[in-house]
Each structure stands twice: as structure tokens, then as C-alpha cells.
């Protein structure tokens, strides 16, 4: 597990490493000046994200920025508090990003429908134009004057709308299942938004391990290997006995291979073989040996 932590450390919060480089979860001293600078940057970032959150989520839902600090003093306590707040910031940013992508898709679909409706009205008004022009305009529209049949944004929107949302007695299970359906249909950005919401809202759900692993796959399948590796490592470290922890460790190796991180990929594969021996020779044997063939480990 130390090897995976070695990987996860530099990967997580890569944009703020300079702010916490001197901190550890042990008892490394931190100067007051460095601490003040980091605290100031943290508060500024939180304020900016709050403003962005209010713009994207009307109603001012602040539940993701409750005070997560802990009482006590010392470098270890301060470091843990900062890491917790950084993790919350990063999670919020990613969910806002997913929400923005979904809103953009909906906006483009609405604009396409509006343009088609305006075009339809224009054709009906200009009745004196030659019949061949009117016929050609009508043929270019989909039935009912909705939106052009070949519009990729409209098609994507319609396809997403066609994916049913489950409604059972377990809302957490429903949220995960809908995220899985989006991922299975190839809508990776929408799946990431859905799964991040599930993880935030139901962190202790029996499907939590499945959700984190699938979120990593939604990044991996979309070519976002760095983010995928972060989520796979996080899922493994969060619950080594989780039902999808061994899968995440294997997918972590795959993501690292795609990044050219052969040494760390070999570390992940070695740890998988050591920690999950039964899976390496059973359920995940085919994937394990296929991944092994992609690298040369000493």
C-alpha cells in the first residue's frame, strides 16, 4: 500500500503542491508565515468556488463547504485540515465542471430547437417563394419542425433523455445505476457528473466502491488517464476490502501504462498480486495477465 500512496501523493492536488510541500501527517514543523500564506490561499479559493457554485446551482446550496476543520493544534492537525479542505475543493470543482458540460449540452439543444422553430415559421410566412424552395426547407427539418435530424448535439441530448432513471426504494442505488447506464451508453462526461454526485451524497453506500471505480473508468475510457489514476488509487486506499478495490488496482496499472509510468504500473501490479491473490488467479486473472503483457517489470 505504501507504493500506491507514493503514487497518489504527487498525483493528488498537483496544482497546489507548492502550498503544502512542507506538510506531512506526522509532526513536521511548519512556519507561521507558510501556514498563513496557505490559509489565505485556501480561503480565497473557497470563496471563488462558492461564487461559482451559486451561479451554477441557484439557491445557494452551501452544504459542500461546511466547516470541516477539526479542533486541536499542531502541524499534523493543520495538515490534515488543509488536505480535507483541498479534497472538498477538488471534488466541488469536478462536479461543477460536469454540471457545466451538461448545461452546455442542454443549451445547445434548446438553441437548435429554437432555430428550427424560427425556420419553420419563416417558411410558412414566405408563401410566395417557389414551391421547390419551400419543399427543400421542409425536407431539411425533422418531422414536427423540432430540430435537424443530423444535429449531433440534438442527437446526443435525445439519446441521454432516452436513458431511463431507475426508481426503487433505494435512492442511492438508483443514483449509481443511472450513472452506470450513462457510462455504459458512452456518455462519459454525464456519467462522471452523476457518479460524483452519488459519491458525495452516499459516501457510505454499499455501492460506494463500485461508484468510485466506475468514476475512474469514466475518466479512463474518455482518455483522461491522470484523473482516472487518481480515482482508482483513491478507491483502493479508501477500502482495500471493497468489492471493486482489486479492479481499481488493476485499472490503476492500466492508466499508469497509458501515461508512460511503467515503474509505478509495475508497483501497482505487484501489489495487486500480493494483496489479491485469489482474484489474480480467478475473477480478474484474464485482465491481470493481459495488463502484465503490456509492460516489462523487473
Image (cartoon, rainbow, N blue to C red):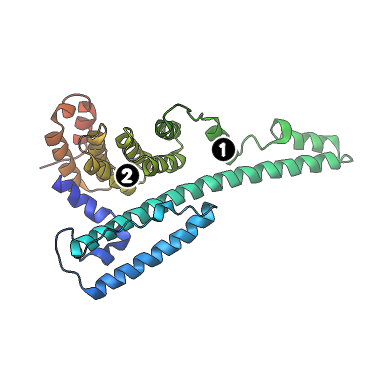
Q: Would residue 243 appear left or right of 99 to someone viewing this image?
A: left
Nearer the N terminus, badge 1 or badge 2?
Answer: 1
Alpha-carbon neighbours of circle 2 within 10 Å: few (<14), some, or many (≥20)?
A: many
**x, y percent for residue 16:** 31, 62
| Label 2 secondary element | helix
Residue 228: which disc?
Answer: 2
Q: Residue furthest bottom?
A: 33
Name the quadrant of the N terminus: top left
Residue underneath mark 1: 157
Alpha-carbon neighbours of circle 1 within 10 Å: few (<14), some, or many (≥20)?
A: some
Within the image, what quadrant is residue 298 found in? top left
Q: From what the image shows, is residue 33 above or below residue 102?
A: below
| Label 1 secondary element | helix
Q: Residue furthest left?
A: 298
Residue at x 28%, y 60% (from the top left corner):
82
Within the image, what quadrant is residue 210 found in? top left
Amino acid at each position: 500500500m505504501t507504493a500506491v500512496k507514493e503514487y497518489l501523493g504527487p498525483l493528488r492536488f498537483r496544482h497546489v503542491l507548492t502550498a503544502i510541500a512542507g506538510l506531512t501527517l506526522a509532526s513536521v514543523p511548519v512556519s507561521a508565515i507558510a501556514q498563513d500564506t496557505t490559509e489565505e490561499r485556501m480561503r480565497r479559493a473557497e470563496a471563488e468556488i462558492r461564487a461559482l457554485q451559486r451561479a451554477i446551482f441557484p439557491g445557494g446550496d452551501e452544504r459542500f463547504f461546511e466547516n470541516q476543520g477539526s479542533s486541536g493544534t499542531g502541524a499534523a492537525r493543520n495538515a490534515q485540515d488543509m488536505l480535507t479542505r483541498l479534497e472538498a475543493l477538488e471534488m466541488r470543482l469536478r462536479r461543477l465542471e460536469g454540471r457545466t458540460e451538461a448545461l452546455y449540452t442542454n443549451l445547445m439543444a434548446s438553441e437548435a430547437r429554437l432555430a428550427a422553430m424560427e425556420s419553420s415559421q419563416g417558411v410558412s410566412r414566405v408563401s410566395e417563394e417557389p414551391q421547390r424552395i419551400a419543399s427543400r426547407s421542409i425536407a431539411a427539418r425533422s418531422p414536427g419542425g423540432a430540430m435537424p435530424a443530423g444535429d449531433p448535439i440534438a442527437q446526443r441530448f435525445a439519446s441521454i433523455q432516452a436513458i431511463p432513471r431507475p426508481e426503487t426504494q433505494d435512492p442511492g442505488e438508483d443514483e449509481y445505476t443511472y450513472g452506470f447506464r450513462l457510462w455504459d451508453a458512452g456518455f462519459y462526461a454525464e456519467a462522471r457528473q452523476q457518479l460524483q454526485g452519488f459519491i458525495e451524497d452516499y459516501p457510505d453506500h454499499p455501492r460506494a466502491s463500485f461508484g468510485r471505480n466506475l468514476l475512474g473508468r469514466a475518466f479512463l475510457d474518455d482518455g483522461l488517464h491522470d484523473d482516472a489514476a487518481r480515482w482508482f488509487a483513491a478507491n483502493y486506499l479508501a477500502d482495500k476490502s471493497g468489492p471493486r478495490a482489486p479492479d481499481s488496482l488493476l485499472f490503476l496499472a492500466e492508466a499508469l501504462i497509458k501515461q508512460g509510468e511503467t515503474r509505478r504500473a509495475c508497483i501497482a501490479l505487484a501489489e495487486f498480486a500480493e494483496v489479491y491473490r485469489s482474484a489474480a488467479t480467478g475473477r480478474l486473472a484474464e485482465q491481470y495477465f493481459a495488463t502484465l503483457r503490456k509492460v516489462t517489470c523487473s
